Image: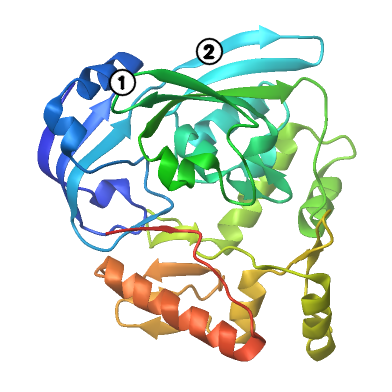
């Protein structure tokens, strides 16, 4: 196990922020983490786990230890007539896993294609897109407690999933380091085509779409709307879609009859944050080295590669202020700020 000092995190956050970590430790197994848990300095030091950093914004250098999973296993570990279970290492690249499952004609995660990041981070964040969330296929999340070295297998109920949230984002989960995720995929076609744009594209492609067909159309849509982080630093969707009461949405619709929305089972309404930002005429708006992406208002970008985390945060605050002033709605960053 390698331990690196004063290590640049530019390659471990998709904004391309050149923050540094006092210590950077890649771990390849549960045993690596258990060995670290017996180290007194590790016990005392501030610590976070970072995958590809596709949902992080470093505001400053990180004074502490950054852990990075390189657990790459994908183990087929259970099967029925209708389902297949896989135990997947937290360091597996998420989109590589989606591609593997779609090519094997297994269903459940094809809508989540081209989302950057690692499998462990996907489970922590409860990533979602085009009407699907990863929690729908998760059975367990395995984690090591950094202070005791004990392995805990969290059931999907214990993970307490909700919109872009899980137990692992709560303060009391700070000492748990995700090592594996148990996923259950379907052998038979069970496509989610609730989003009109995706449905139209898939149906136009074939009358009998497969997971691979859906994956390829999702990739096309995302590439049309979202910048490649390797070219233009960004974290994808920066803000969560606000969820409001039916009464609050009715007031919004009276002023803006064209307002898009998604009715939720509990009677509340989800309003696309991108639409709110777009109506504030903020596409392409630049503040210093940071900008709102000109083709998708939900995305903030490192416009010239020179932005700091503070630059991005200041732009995010300005966007929030403009939306609140115009619509009376609060939009919240999906991206996690690290200081």
Along the line of sight, which residue is nearer the eye, 329 or 160?
160
Task: Using residue 328 as the reference point, say whether residue 252 is left or right of it.
Answer: right
Q: Helix, strand or loop at disc 1? A: loop
Residue for badge 2: 75
Q: Quick one: SS at disc 2?
A: strand
Residue 281 seen from this side: no
The residues bearing labels 2 and 1 have C-alpha atoms spaced at a distance of 15 Å
Q: Is residue 246 above or below residue 84?
A: below
Q: Quadrant of residue 277?
A: bottom right
Residue 222: give x, y in percent of width and height.
60, 55
User: Quarter holding the C terminus?
Assistant: bottom left
In the rendered image, residue 175, in percent from the top left (x then y), is placed at: 35, 35
Specify whether 213 is left or right of 194. Answer: left
At horizontal 79% and vertical 76% (from top left) the residue drawn is 249
Total residue callouts? 2
The 10 Å Cα crowd at callout 2, few under 14, some 14 to 19, many 20 or more, is few
Badge 1 is on which residue? 28
What x and y, as percent, mark residue 16?
30, 57
Give the mark nearer the N terminus: 2 vs 1. Answer: 1
Residue at figure coordinates x 77%, y 70% from the top left: 245
Quadrant of the rendered structure where residue 17 is? Answer: bottom left
Relative to 145, say whether 172 is above or below.
below
In the rendering, which numbered label is found on residue 65?
none
Q: Is the residue 317 above or below the residue 88 in the image?
A: below
Image quarter in which the N terminus is found:
top left
């Amino acid at each position: 196990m390698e331990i690196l000092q004063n290590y640049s995190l530019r390659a471990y956050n998709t904004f391309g922020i050149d923050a540094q970590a006092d210590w950077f430790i890649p771990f390849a197994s549960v045993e690596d983490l258990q060995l670290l848990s017996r180290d007194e300095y590790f016990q005392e030091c501030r610590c976070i786990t970072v995958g590809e950093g596709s949902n992080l914004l470093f505001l400053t250098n990180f004074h502490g230890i950054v852990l990075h999973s390189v657990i790459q296993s994908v183990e087929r570990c259970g099967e029925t007539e209708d389902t297949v279970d896989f135990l997947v290492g937290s360091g597996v690249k998420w989109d590589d896993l989606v591609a593997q499952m779609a090519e094997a004609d297994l269903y459940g995660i094809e809508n989540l294609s081209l989302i950057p990041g690692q499998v462990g981070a996907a489970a922590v964040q409860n990533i979602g897109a085009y009407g699907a969330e990863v929690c729908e296929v998760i059975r367990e999340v395995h984690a090591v407690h950094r202070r005791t070295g004990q392995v805990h297998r969290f059931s999907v109920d214990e993970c307490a999933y909700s919109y872009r949230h899980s137990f692992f984002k709560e303060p009391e989960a700070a000492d748990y380091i995700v090592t594996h995720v148990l996923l259950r995929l379907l052998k038979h076609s069970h496509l989610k085509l609730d989003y009109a744009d995706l449905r139209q594209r898939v149906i136009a492609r074939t009358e009998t779409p497969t997971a691979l067909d859906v994956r390829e159309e999702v990739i096309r849509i995302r590439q049309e709307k979202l910048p490649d982080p390797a070219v233009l630093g960004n974290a994808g969707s920066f803000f969560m879609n606000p969820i409001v009461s039916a009464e609050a949405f009715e007031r919004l619709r009276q002023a803006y009859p064209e307002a898009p929305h998604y009715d939720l089972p509990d009677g509340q309404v989800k309003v696309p944050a991108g639409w709110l930002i777009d109506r504030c005429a903020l596409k392409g708006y630049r503040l210093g080295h940071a900008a709102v992406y000109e083709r998708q208002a939900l995305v903030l970008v490192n416009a010239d590669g020179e932005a700091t985390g503070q630059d991005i945060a200041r732009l995010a605050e300005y966007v929030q202020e403009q939306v609140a002033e115009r619509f009376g709605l609060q939009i919240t960053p999906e991206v996690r700020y690290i200081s």
